[in-house]
Image (cartoon, rainbow, N blue to C red):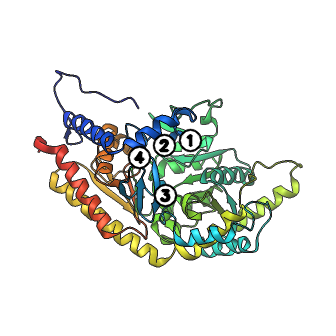
């Protein structure tokens, strides 16, 4: 998004309780501070431009609000160290990929154990076969498959849902994100489903395959499902990839009832809301999906995802396999369920995703949320804090938010970017895409308090004479 600039001589004004001029001033000061503190990162980032496009191996690495990328030396637990020797309390944790900490000892041990047993042979291993029983016991659905990313898992699950139901369309929630899944790249504008602006190389009109409605909007959900054209509703149980939107009371019960009444499958994507507990939001709140997807942290930071489904979906797949012509199904990739990933998933389920770990994570997250809320109240800014388990967000708008449109309007990019950069300069790293913070079992109280104190200092600098 192009950066808005304050026009010299124009009247100053407020944005979310903060003078725009103060946001610009803080950003300029923090950029200079960042340059002074990270000379080795700057040198390495410049040299890298000779090989990688835009200087980084994956362009999302440029989404941090930094003058140049921060280059990492190592990361252990909830601590990250850059090549300039600075130590950061990491509350991003790989945007959930390292939600159980960086290089957790059980995963390091599992990798070492498996290092000489072969990494990928497209056949099951003895330990890998045990993962199916672990997933069924943990998340409640009887049948499972393994993929490489949550994007893959969602794609495969949606393809199967269309095949099983014989229906072509899916339904998503406005403001959602389910990875690189083409048919989910639509948005709601003026009450109409439109292709999301910004897509590169999109050659198909996605509005023909996807219906989008607002989260928490039961009347619109019922109208869409009563057409009996929707194969599957795919949703996070809490919207997390915009600004956090919590479900209304009884929303999930009504969603489940309406999907069942209309023969529509329900897919719950827990890739972010696994912060809710060892069984995710689904187990904690008794949801009953037909399909379930979990990516990112399921292998302790290695690339892997899982997707599960019900007896009825499995019966449908059995029928399809008997009837379909020979040829590729479009479900699965060569490196899916490779032996190393399966070993890591087994270890994660048994040793990382434990009740004890989540108790610590939630205790830290609750302390963080309370501290941020206190700062917001003290400085009288019209913001709020939302939390789902170990996942916390501050939102620069009054709350709580009701749906994706409200979440979209709540974003204040220039303000948020200035805050992110200022927090990093004070030793705290949070996610670049929105104001998400995670705690893990390695997070310490002192790290939480550092983030609270840093946030309070930054907000103080921003409000200044504004209050």
Residue appearing at x 47%, y 57% in the figure: 74
Residue appearing at x 50%, y 64% in the figure: 274
Q: Residue 362: x, y in percent? A: 38, 70
Compared with 33, 340 (above or below) is: below
Circle 4 crowding by C-alpha within 10 Å: few under 14, some 14–19, many from 20: many
Quarter of the image that includes the N terminus: top left
Residue appearing at x 69%, y 52% in the figure: 156
Circle 2 crowding by C-alpha within 10 Å: few under 14, some 14–19, many from 20: some
Compared with 390, 88 (above or below) is: above
Q: Nearer the viewer, mark 1 or mark 3?
A: 1
- Between disc 3 and disc 2, whose residue precedes? 2
Label 3 sits on residue: 96
Separation of marks 3 and 2 at Cα, in angstroms:
15 Å
Separation of marks 2 and 4 at Cα, in angstroms:
9 Å
Q: Are marks 1 and 2 in contact (CB under 8 Å)?
A: yes
Label 2 sits on residue: 61
- Between disc 1 and disc 3, whose residue precedes? 1
- Secondary-structure class at tag 1: loop
- Between disc 2 and disc 4, whose residue precedes? 2
Circle 3 crowding by C-alpha within 10 Å: few under 14, some 14–19, many from 20: many
Q: Residue 123: x, y in percent? A: 80, 64
Separation of marks 4 and 3 at Cα, in angstroms:
12 Å
Q: Nearer the viewer, residue 279 or 256?
A: 279
Label 1 sits on residue: 57
The circle on residue 432 is 4
């Amino acid at each position: 998004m192009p950066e808005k600039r304050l026009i010299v001589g124009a009247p100053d004004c407020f944005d979310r309780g903060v003078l725009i001029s103060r946001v610009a001033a803080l950003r300029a000061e923090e950029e200079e501070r960042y340059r002074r503190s990270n000379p080795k990162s700057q040198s390495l980032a410049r040299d890298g431009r000779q090989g990688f496009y835009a200087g980084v191996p994956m362009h999302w690495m440029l989404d941090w609000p930094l003058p140049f990328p921060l280059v990492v030396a190592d990361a252990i637990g909830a601590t990250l160290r850059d090549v300039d020797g600075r130590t950061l309390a990491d509350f991003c944790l790989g945007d959930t990929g390292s939600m159980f900490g960086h290089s957790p000892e059980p995963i390091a041990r599992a990798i070492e154990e498996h290092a000489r047993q072969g990494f990928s042979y497209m056949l099951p291993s003895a330990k890998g076969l045990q993962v199916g029983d672990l997933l069924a016991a943990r998340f409640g659905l009887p049948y499972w498959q393994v993929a490489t990313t949550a994007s893959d898992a969602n794609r495969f699950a949606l393809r199967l849902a269309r095949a099983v139901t014989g229906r072509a369309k899916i339904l998503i929630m406005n403001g959602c994100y389910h990875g690189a899944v083409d048919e989910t790249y639509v948005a709601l504008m003026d009450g109409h489903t439109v292709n999301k602006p910004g897509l590169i190389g999109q050659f198909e009109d996605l509005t023909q395959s996807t219906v989008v409605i607002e989260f928490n909007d039961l009347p619109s959900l019922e109208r869409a499902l009563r057409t009996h054209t929707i194969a599957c509703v795919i949703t996070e149980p809490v919207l997390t990839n915009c600004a956090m939107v919590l479900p209304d009371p009884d929303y999930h019960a009504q969603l489940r009832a309406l999907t069942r009444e209309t023969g529509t499958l329900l897919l719950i994507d827990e890739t972010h809301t696994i912060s809710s507990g060892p069984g995710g939001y689904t187990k904690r709140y008794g949801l009953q999906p037909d399909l379930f997807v979990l990516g990112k942290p399921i292998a302790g930071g290695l690339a892997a995802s899982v997707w599960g489904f019900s007896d009825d979906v499995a019966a449908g797949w059995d029928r399809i396999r008997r009837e379909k012509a020979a040829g590729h199904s479009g479900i699965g990739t060569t490196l899916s369920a490779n032996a190393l990933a399966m070993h890591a998933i087994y270890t994660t389920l048994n040793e990382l995703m434990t009740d004890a770990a989540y108790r610590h994570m939630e205790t830290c997250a609750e302390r963080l949320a309370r501290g941020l809320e206190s700062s917001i109240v003290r400085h009288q800014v019209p913001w709020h804090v939302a939390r789902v388990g170990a996942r916390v967000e501050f939102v620069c708008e009054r709350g709580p938010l009701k749906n994706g449109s409200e979440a979209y309007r709540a974003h204040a990019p220039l303000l948020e970017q200035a805050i992110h950069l200022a927090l990093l300069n004070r030793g705290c790293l949070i996610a670049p895409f929105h104001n998400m913070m995670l705690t893990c079992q390695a997070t310490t109280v002192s790290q939480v308090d550092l983030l609270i104190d840093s946030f309070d200092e930054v907000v103080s600098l921003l409000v200044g004479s504004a209050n």
